[in-house]
């Protein structure tokens, strides 16, 4: 089975367009992670910040609150996700945030346009990571800082792996290869990748993302609301298949049971680097 980058991007775009409103509504699940990523970014008033793979601009909106007098730009390939973010920013009368169609591998911004670049849970879904990192370095000012969050190894990320294991157990193999959400789950590989792209002073630390669900059904719905390209594929399944997946995901989630509910504590790696 070969990998088709263009097809993969189309699927990701379709998935995030499909779940845009639900993804934004579920932002509380990632509040602690977003705060940790922003802290690693060392944001300052007046800065220009680019948030890549921003979806509906949740991280960009939070960044805007830390850069008074500056500008946070939410960039993504999913136009309906960006539109969802625009509507929410308008309701909040947030004038420190902008939105732009942005493919990380072909950024439309001039050289040195930003003081900071953020990318929350997005790097592993860029087909050509070296090219994307080169583009980020190009649009980052000298001395600027880039910050990423990525999922850890699969065994440490039940929030994602439980649903994926259930999907693999019940559904036939996919017709097209997909990028693994855990492809940068090893700290040494993540560090090597950023340093090979020319970023210096690379710092890494692990963050525990703890999400509580009252039932396995709540977990399954949350996964579908956050799953991007996988959401597009799941949306094409018959209703009875989706219902079966929802029932049987409890089998994978069982080790995460706490009391009457489930808490799939998951590891996220946060990495920061600097452009010389």
Image (spheres, rainbow, N blue to C red):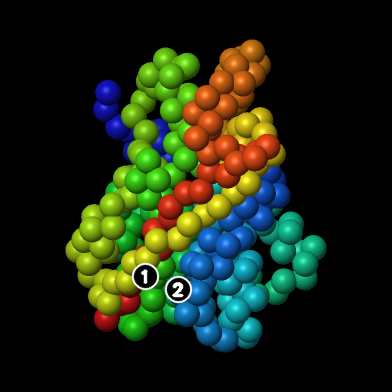
Residue that carries the numbered disc 2 in the rendered image? 40
Name the residue: 43% across, 55% down. 268
Quarter of the image where the C terminus is located: bottom left
Above or below 232: residue 131: below
**Observer able to see residue 102:** no
Contact, mark 2 vs mark 1 (Cβ under 8 Å): yes
Which type of secondary structure does the marked residue at label 2 adopt? helix
Residue 122 versus residue 262 in the image, above or below? below
Quadrant of the rendered image containing residue 183 = top left
Callout 1: SS: strand
Which one is in front, 39 or 234? 39
Cα distance between the residues tagged 2 and 1: 7 Å
Q: Which residue is mark 1?
A: 272
The residue at 73%/59% (across/down) is 88
Give the percent coordinates (x, y) of residue 168.
42, 23
Q: Earlier in the sequence, mark 2 or mark 1?
A: 2
Residue at the extreme front of the image, as rendered = 259
Q: Nearer the viewer, residue 110 or 88?
A: 88
**Residue at the image position 53 percent from the left and 31 percent from the top:** 254
Left or right position of 231 against 116 = right
> In the image, residue 207 lies at what x, y percent?
45, 61
């Amino acid at each position: 089975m070969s990998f088709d980058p263009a097809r993969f991007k189309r699927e990701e775009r379709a998935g995030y367009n499909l779940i845009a409103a639900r993804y934004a509504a579920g932002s509380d699940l990632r509040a602690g992670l977003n705060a940790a990523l922003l802290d690693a970014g060392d944001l300052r008033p007046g800065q220009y910040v680019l948030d890549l793979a921003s979806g509906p601009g949740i991280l960009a909106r939070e960044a805007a609150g830390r850069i008074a007098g500056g500008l946070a730009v939410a960039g993504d390939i999913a136009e309906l996700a960006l539109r969802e973010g625009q509507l929410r920013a308008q309701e909040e009368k947030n004038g420190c945030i902008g939105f732009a169609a942005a493919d990380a591998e072909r950024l439309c911004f001039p050289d040195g346009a930003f003081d900071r670049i953020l990318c929350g849970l997005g790097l592993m879904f860029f087909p050509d990571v070296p090219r994307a990192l080169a583009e980020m370095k190009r649009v980052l000012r000298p001395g600027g800082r880039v910050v990423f969050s990525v999922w850890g190894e699969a065994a440490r990320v039940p929030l994602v792996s439980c649903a994926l294991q259930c999907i693999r157990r019940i559904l036939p193999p996919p017709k097209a290869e997909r990028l693994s959400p855990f492809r940068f789950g090893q700290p040494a590989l993540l560090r090597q990748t950023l340093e090979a792209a020319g970023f210096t002073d690379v710092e890494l630390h692990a963050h525990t993302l703890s999400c509580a669900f009252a039932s396995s059904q709540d977990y399954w719905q949350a996964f579908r609301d956050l799953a991007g390209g996988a959401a597009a594929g799941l949306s094409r399944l018959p209703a009875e298949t989706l219902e079966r997946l929802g029932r049987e995901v409890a089998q994978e989630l069982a080790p995460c049971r706490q009391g009457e509910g489930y808490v799939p504590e998951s590891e996220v790696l946060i990495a920061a680097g600097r452009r010389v």
